[in-house]
Image (spheres, rainbow, N blue to C red):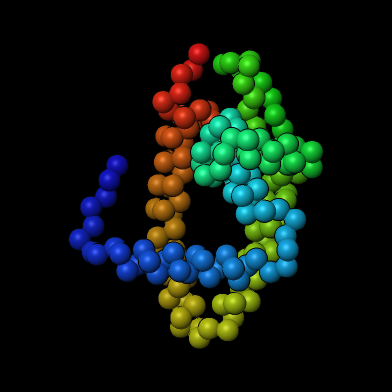
Amino acid sequence: MLYKCSVDLSRPASDLLELVTLVVRGAAGEREQLSLTAVAALGSLERCGAQRVTALAAAEGVSQPAMTQLIHRLEHRGLVDRTSDPADGRVALVSLTAAGRRALAGRRQRNAERIAGLLAGLPDRDVQSLAGALSAVLPGLRERITADAISRHGGDGRPEDEEHG
């Protein structure tokens, strides 16, 4: 579903992109155990459920061989499992393990603490304005992004245009 907006979105979009970039840099802190691509892949598995490696690669904008290597490393660390796709036994589905959920939750907690530290230096009024804006837009953006990811991958880790069979 497309939403029509009478506001010029170029400035808010640009500002939001800059904010995201600043937050990612600010939250990065010391060298993390998981790369941004690994965290993104784990997050995709958490949001959308088990997926094929090809779907994860497409969603994260990396090659299938690169995603296969990443999944192998994550599997070796116990963060993901690979199982046969019930619809096509030749294909593996990747899913998040309990350890993967804990690692993702820990990463998010550390990042939230770093971001809270960054926000602590701002005036209370600005932080309250930001909190209000985030409360207003995050639910809708979260819903649209999740729905888009599910529609691209058919809810089962397969891109919609991929044959099922």
Is residue 96 in view?
A: no
Pinpoint residue 97: horizontal percent, then vertical percent: 72, 38
Viewer-proximal residue among 45 and 70: 70
The mark tally for this picture is 0
Q: Is 106 situated left or right of 125 in this image?
A: right
- What residue do we see at 75% from left, 55% from top? 33
- For the N terminus, the image quarter is top left
- What residue do we see at 65% from left, 48% from top? 38
Is residue 129 in view?
A: yes
- What residue do we see at 40% from left, 69% from top? 15
Dividing the picture into quadrants, the one containing residue 120 is: bottom right
Q: Considering only vertical position in the picture, is 39 above or below 75? A: below
Q: Considering only vertical position in the picture, is 21 above or below 52? A: below
Pinpoint residue 93: horizontal percent, then vertical percent: 63, 27
Dividing the picture into quadrants, the one containing residue 79 is: top right
Q: Considering only vertical position in the picture, is 5 above or below 158? A: below
Q: State the residue lying farthest toward the left.
A: 6
- What residue do we see at 62% from left, 21% from top? 91
Pinpoint residue 108: horizontal percent, then vertical percent: 65, 58
Dividing the picture into quadrants, the one containing residue 62 is: top right
Pinpoint residue 13: horizontal percent, then vertical percent: 36, 63
Viewer-proximal residue among 25 and 95: 25
